Image (spheres, rainbow, N blue to C red):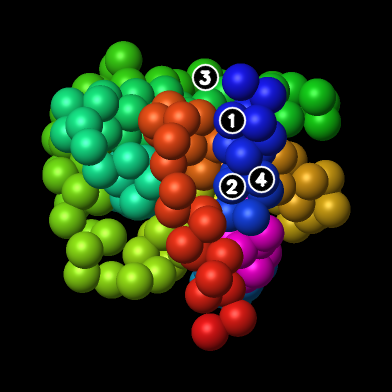
Amino acid sequence: MTKSKNSKLKEITVELIHHLPYSIFGVVLAFLLLGILNFVVHIAQAEAEMPHAAEEMFHIFHPMHVLISAVATTAMFWKHDNRNVLKALIVGFLGSVTICGISDVIVPYLGGVVLGYKMGFHICLIEEPSLVYPFAVIGVLAGLAVTKSFDKSTQYSHGTHVFISSVASLLYLISFGVSEWTHAVGSVFIVTLVAVMFPCCLSDIVFPMVCTHRYCQHSEEEGRHIHH
C-alpha cells in the first residue's frame, strides 16, 4: 500500500514539474493581454465601460475555461488509466465544472474582499448553466480523443488552460469590484496565481491522477523517454 502511494506521489510530482513552464507562461501571457487591453481602454478614455465589457468577456472566457479544463483533466486521467471510460467521463466533468468555479469565481471574489474591495458574487454554474454544462461535455469527449492524436496533449492543454483561467480570473476581478486593477497589480498578480495555479494543477494533474488505478505504469514508461 505504501509503495503504491509513493509511486502515485512520484507520478504527480513528475507531472507537476513537466507542466510548470506552461503554467508560468500562461499566467504571464494573460497579464500582458489584459495590460494591453487596459492601455487601449485608457487611450480611448472609456474606463467607465471597462467593468461591463470585462463582464461580457468573462462570459466568453469562463465557458472556454470549462471546455479546456475538461479536455486537460480527461486527457490526464485517460493518459494514466484508459480502462474505464465512464470513470474518465465523471472525473473530467466534475474536475472541470467544480474547480473552474473555484478558480474563476470563488478565489477572485475572496481575493478581492481580502484586498478591501466591495465584490459582487456571480456563479454561472447556477445562474447561467447553459454557459457551463455544454462546454464541459464537449471538453470531456475531446479529452478522450486528444491523447491518441497528440503526444504532448496534456502539457499543451494545461498551458492553454492556465492562460484562459488567468484571463477569466482577471476579468472577474475587473467586472465585479477591482476595476482599477493596475493600481494594485502586485496584489492582483498574487490573487491570480492562487486562483489559477492551485485549482488548475488540482484539476489537470492531481485530481485525475489520484483517481487512476493503482497499477498504472505510465510514469515508468515516461521516465525512460524523459530526456528524448
Count neighbours of disc 2 (C-alpha within 10 A) and say few if under 14, some if 14 to 19, many if 20 or more. many
Pointer 2 and pointer 4: residues touching (CB < 8 Å)?
A: yes
Residue type at the position of mark 1: Ser
The answer to which of marks 3 and 4 sits earlier in the sequence is 4
Where does the image place residue 187, in percent across and percent down from the top left? 83, 45
Q: What is the spatial separation of the Cα atoms under label 4 and label 1, in whole angstroms?
A: 10 Å
Residue visible at 35% across and 51% down in the picture: 79
Residue 22, above or below 135: below
Residue 11, label in figure? 2
Residue visible at 75% across and 51% down in the picture: 189
**Mark 1 sits on what residue?**
4
Tell which of 152 and 81 is nearer to you.
81
Residue 120 lies left or right of residue 6; in this view the side is left
Where does the image place residue 159, in percent across and percent down from the top left? 50, 63
Q: What is the spatial separation of the Cα atoms under label 3 and label 1, in whole angstroms?
A: 42 Å
Residue type at the position of mark 4: Lys
Count neighbours of disc 4 (C-alpha within 10 A) and say few if under 14, some if 14 to 19, many if 20 or more. few
| Quadrant of res 2 | top right
Residue 168, above or below 103: below
Residue type at the position of mark 2: Glu
What secondary structure is found at the residue carrying circle 2? helix
User: Which residues, given as a range, are shown in magenta?
Assistant: 16-26
The answer to which of marks 3 and 1 sits earlier in the sequence is 1
Please indicate, yes or no, whether residue 87 appears anywhere in the rendered image: yes
Where does the image place residue 65, in percent across and percent down from the top left? 38, 46
**Mark 3 sits on what residue?**
121
